[in-house]
Image: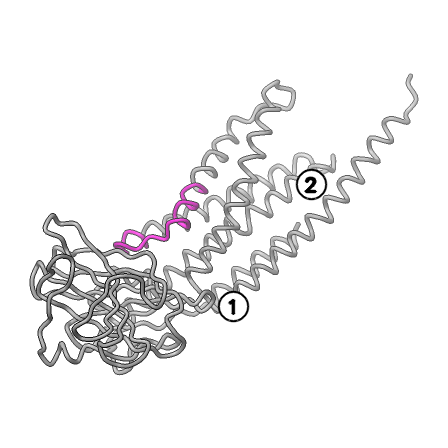
Amino acid sequence: MASLLQISQLFSLLFLLTLSPSLSSTCTSPKLISSYQTCTQLSSLSSSLHFTYNRLNKSLSIAFTATPPSPSGWVAWGINPTSTGMAGTQAILGYRNSDGTMSVKTLNISSYSDLVEGKLSFDVSDKRAVFNSGDGSITIFATVQNPGDGKINHVWQVGPSVSKGFPDKHDFKPENLASKGSLDLNGSGQSGSSSSDTSSSNDATKKRNIHGILNAISWGLLFPIGAIIARYLRTFESADPVWFYVHVSCQISGYAIGVAGWATGLQLGSKSVGIVYTSHRYIGIALFALATLQIFALFLRPKKEHKLRFYWNIYHHSVGYAILTLGIINVFKGLNILDPEKKWKSTYVSILIVLGAIAVLLELFTWIVVWRRRSSRSTKPYA
């Protein structure tokens, strides 16, 4: 079991030493920085764009923030796959309704006078908008599938009002006409954008990485190792009760680290208004609840000869395997969100394969030991 602990220590050390933060720029919406890899102050209309490009599934998650000319105005951001201007842009529009609710629509701007609401040339999901009462700005959130590779042309705009669900004409001031640019999905943001100070965004990225590291070590490594110790060391009578204390120490350590990771996740969520990774969040809540029940159940553990010990074992094993399964699933979901270098996911997969192979070998060895023990007892002569 020492080799298993060494693997976890090596993994955490490498992760801490070489996982570098993403490059980001200072933006006007610092509360969103912790949820995106890149933040760019756009060149006009006092607007900003946070985005994360996931190279694995080719999805672009964006948060576009701008302030409309009036409280009843609109903001829009889009991608032009054919040219650099507004004509041909596939746009996402956000505005505030008279009752205070927010609306988000997708518009195909085939020409300056022809706006068609409906499906765009690429899939758009997770559309939503948030109104900031402090400065009157609107933030549009969305995920764009297959936006293009490398540099893409993007356009943004603000307008004074909305009529029957469609945006009224915007101003044609120099800053309105200049609201276009090139977005580098593989670089640090918009070509020609300003970048004055990267410390705050890099700090947020470090917190995201710390959150991922803590959870990977706890749910993804320590809990599986603790389960292996409990299942296979107790087979050897000479290891009792040492295996129990090693198992408990491993699980309590994993729980403590997991709680720290869960707390950092809550902190990141509180600083990222409007950004919710739903499945990752709900699985994390379920893990925390199940692990807490498991820890408290330790103090209610009946003695071996007690009639309730059988049912307690069923509960303990069921909840334990649920934690293992959900923990590993959530680690992979977290890796997809963080989108680190490919080697980190490959490293974690390799570690799981090693642990799985060790578990299979120990399972076979355990059955052999149990079978020999039963055979020995059955062949003993009766006194």
Horizontal and vertical percent position of residue 369: 80, 39
Residue type marked 2: Leu
Lateral position of residue 140 relative to residue 186, left or right? left
| Marked residue nearer the N-terminal end (1 or 2) | 2
If the image is split into quadrants, where does the C terminus sit?
top right
Q: In this view, does 252 lie above or below 221?
A: above
Q: Is residue 374 above or below residue 216?
A: above
Horizontal and vertical percent position of residue 109: 23, 71
- Residue at 35%, 65% in the rendered image: 144
Q: Mark 1 points at which residue?
A: 342
Is residue 282 in the magenta section?
yes
Horizontal and vertical percent position of residue 295: 49, 35
- Rate crowding at label 2 as few (under 14), some (14 to 19) or many (20 or more) other CA atoms within 10 Å: many
Horizontal and vertical percent position of residue 1: 66, 49
The tag on residue 233 is 2
Is residue 217 in the magenta section?
no
Q: Give the Cα distance between marks 1 and 2.
A: 35 Å
Residue type marked 1: Lys
Question: For the magenta stretch, what is the residue range?
Answer: 268-287
Element assignment for label 2? helix
Q: Are marks 1 and 2 in contact (CB under 8 Å)?
A: no
- Residue at 87%, 31% in the rendered image: 376
Element assignment for label 1? helix
